[in-house]
Image (cartoon, rainbow, N blue to C red):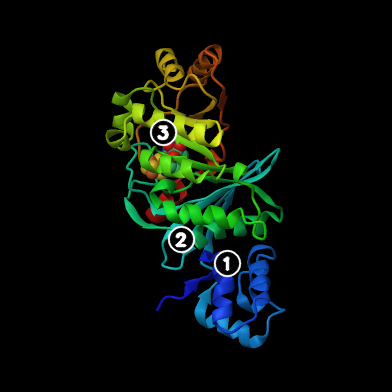
Amino acid sequence: MDLVKIRNLSFKELSEHMLAAGYPKFRANQIFAWQNQKLVQSFNDMTNLPKELIAYLNKNFILQTLTIQKKLTSEDGNTTKLLYKLSDNNLIESVIMRYNYGYSVCVSTQVGCKMGCKFCASGADGFIRNLEPAEILEQVIIAQKLVKQRIGHVVLMGIGEPLDNFDNVVKFISLVTNKDGLNISGRNISISTSGLVDKIYKLAELDLSCTLSVSLHAPNNELRSKLMPINNKWNLEELMQACRFYFKKTGRRISFEYIMINKLNDTIEQSYDLAELIKGYPTHVNLIPINSGKQTDFKPSTAKDIKAFKCNLEQLGVNVTVRRTLGADINAACGQLKKKEIRR
Ligand code: SAH
Ligand code: SF4
């Protein structure tokens, strides 16, 4: 029988388990604090627990589910990419980023991805499995241990489609925002999606106060369907309606990711179409020069084209930034390091 990953349990579930096993409830408080505040990775390090309880935990649970396989830091020291091995030997990635407002970690939510976007390394080898809440949470915990400072922000933008692993992602959010856990504010969590419309409605209803970040990448259905097969299931009109609903329900402005691909989606005309598509409510557009890996022939837009695209959006009243390319020297785009490791 597989051991239970203890970090999958909410505090309530852990307390119930401890009571049922005949331990006083305060033991659950102690264990939860070791897991989430002192961030230990072995039950043997929970030094205020009786030996017998430590033996019980070792027999029934696992605490550490990830091991660092590789760690790369960019030349400027602001970006660290981690390749992790899971307990079933699958590989995933996280990226730790240092900003002027603090540390942010970008976590993976699945091993592989089903969505098959043409520009993306994560989905290139298909889908293997969902990550469990503990496996997502541990990416934040290990990051915090490494930088020895509080991680204030989490973005679900690593490998995988978060909304395709809905229940585990929602459980992860409730664990990571727990006041007695890592206590990261829901407002500082961004969930990135390729546009699973049914799940956007479901997420809006939960009102977790997270930012919804939608990977748009094209201002019309024809081009978007070529780049992102999900657009054949839910087109841009349906996606935009869901985004407006998310804003209405949560009051959180929607963030749109737009990768800039040379001569494909970066013309001035397309910037007009983009502005038209998202007009009328609070949004933010993040332009990202595509990180071209071996898996695609797409080239990033030129600096001149990006500037012109951005300026035109600004003139049309769109809130827009160009994302600084984080750690291109360390294959920081999602899935690229894993892909390289597998090729090796
Ligand atoms: N599946 C989710 C979240 C993970 S992908 C989603 O698609 O939103 C995180 C972001 O990286 C997405 O915006 C995705 O479009 C983008 N991305 C994928 N491949 C990229 C590449 N080669 N260069 C730049 N961004 C890329
Ligand atoms: Fe999956 Fe996102 Fe990559 Fe598309 S961009 S294949 S949804 S991880």
Q: Is mark 1 on a helix, strand or loop?
A: helix
| Three-letter residue code for mark 1 | Lys
Residue 101, image x, y percentages = 70, 39
In space, the residues marked 3 and 1 are separated at their CA atoms by: 33 Å
Residue 149 in the figure: left or right of residue 223 = right
Q: Which of 133 and 73 is in front in this view?
A: 133
| Three-letter residue code for mark 2 | Glu
Residue 190 in sight in this render: yes
Q: How many labels does the image show?
A: 3
Callout 3 crowding tier (Cα within 10 Å): few <14, some 14–19, many ≥20: many
The residue beneath circle 3 is: 242
**First of labels 3, 2 by sequence position:** 2
Quadrant for ligand 2 reads top left
Residue 23, image x, y percentages = 62, 82
In space, the residues marked 1 and 2 are separated at their CA atoms by: 18 Å
Residue at 55% over, 11% down: 315
The residue beneath circle 1 is: 12
| Three-letter residue code for mark 3 | Ala
Of tags 1 and 2, the one toward the viewer is 1
Query: Does the residue tagged 2 have its C-beta within 8 Å of any atom of ligand 1?
Result: no
Please state, as top left, top right, bottom left or bottom right, where the N terminus lies in the image.
Answer: bottom left
The residue beneath circle 2 is: 132
- Residue 55, quarter of picture: bottom right
**First of labels 3, 1 by sequence position:** 1
In space, the residues marked 3 and 2 are separated at their CA atoms by: 27 Å
Residue 201 in the figure: left or right of residue 180 = left
Callout 2 crowding tier (Cα within 10 Å): few <14, some 14–19, many ≥20: many
Above or below — where is 289 with respect to 171? Answer: above
